[in-house]
Amino acid sequence: MASDWDKVLAGGALDSQSEEIANDRIRGQALLARLNGSPAGDTPLRQQICRELFGHCPDSCWISTPFTCEFGRNIHIGEKTFFNFNVTILDVGEVHIGSHVLLAPNVQIYTATHTMNYLDRRNWTAYNKPVRIGDDCWIGGGAIICPGVTIGPRSIIGAGAVVTRNIPADSVAVGNPAKVIRTLKQDEERCWELAQ
């Protein structure tokens, strides 16, 4: 028999009356409070909390605080990924963030979405569209990643961009809505160019 989470992650509505989901939200918020209240220098404690909070978070990652999420359980992070201050992830659906990813301050990642029908929204009915960020991406400060977006490996999202559509690998995307303005050539010799 499918759990309430199985139904949600398969595209069904989030049942806010579900005991399983309510308990996971309470658990996630308690762990989040512990993480945000932990000393920055107590790396073993912070790693242990992250292992409990997230679906997957290797000890090689660093999550700067304050950090905000709803459940934590639906967030899966690769090796040596860095979250700067004030990252927010609404993880009604799954969020897969690759290895060696840099999230700048105030990045927002949303999987939660609602119907266009106002009567459904009156009941706070929520659905999800998963988000995927490939290895070696850099997401600039204040960028917003909307539900259902996939960002290909090695791509750069400019500060303040609003990403509403998929971004191919090796791309630089900026603006609102974000548009690809450049393709990166990874086989060229490193040029040490600073991103603007």
Image (tube, rainbow, N blue to C red):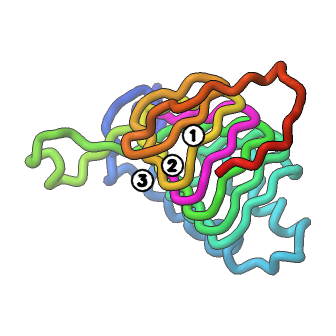
Residue type (three-letter) at the residue carrying disc 2: Ile
Tell me, yes or no, whether the two marked residues, 1 and 2, touch with CB atoms within 8 Å: yes
The local crowd at label 3, few if under 14, some if 14 to 19, many if 20 or more residues have their Cα within 10 Å, is few
- On whether residue 65 falls in the magenta region, the answer is no
Residue type (three-letter) at the residue carrying disc 3: Glu
Q: Residue at x 53, y 37 (%)?
A: 173
Q: Residue at x 48, y 27 (%)?
A: 166
- On whether residue 136 falls in the magenta region, the answer is yes
Q: Spatial distance from mark 1 to mark 2, Cα to Cα?
A: 8 Å
Q: Give the dominant element type of the magenta stretch: helix, strand or loop.
A: loop
Q: Nearer the viewer, residue 153 or 195?
A: 195
- The segment highlighted magenta reads 130-143
> Residue 124's x, y, as percent?
24, 53
Q: Choose the circle earlier in sequence order: 3 or 2.
A: 3
Q: Nearer the viewer, mark 1 or mark 2?
A: 2
> Residue 9's x, y, as percent?
46, 32
Q: Which residue is mark 3?
A: 19
Q: Residue at x 53, y 28 (%)?
A: 167
Any mark on residue 109, and which? 2
Any mark on residue 95, and which? 1
Any mark on residue 31, and which? none
Q: Nearer the viewer, residue 182 or 43?
A: 182
Q: Residue at x 72, y 35 (%)?
A: 98
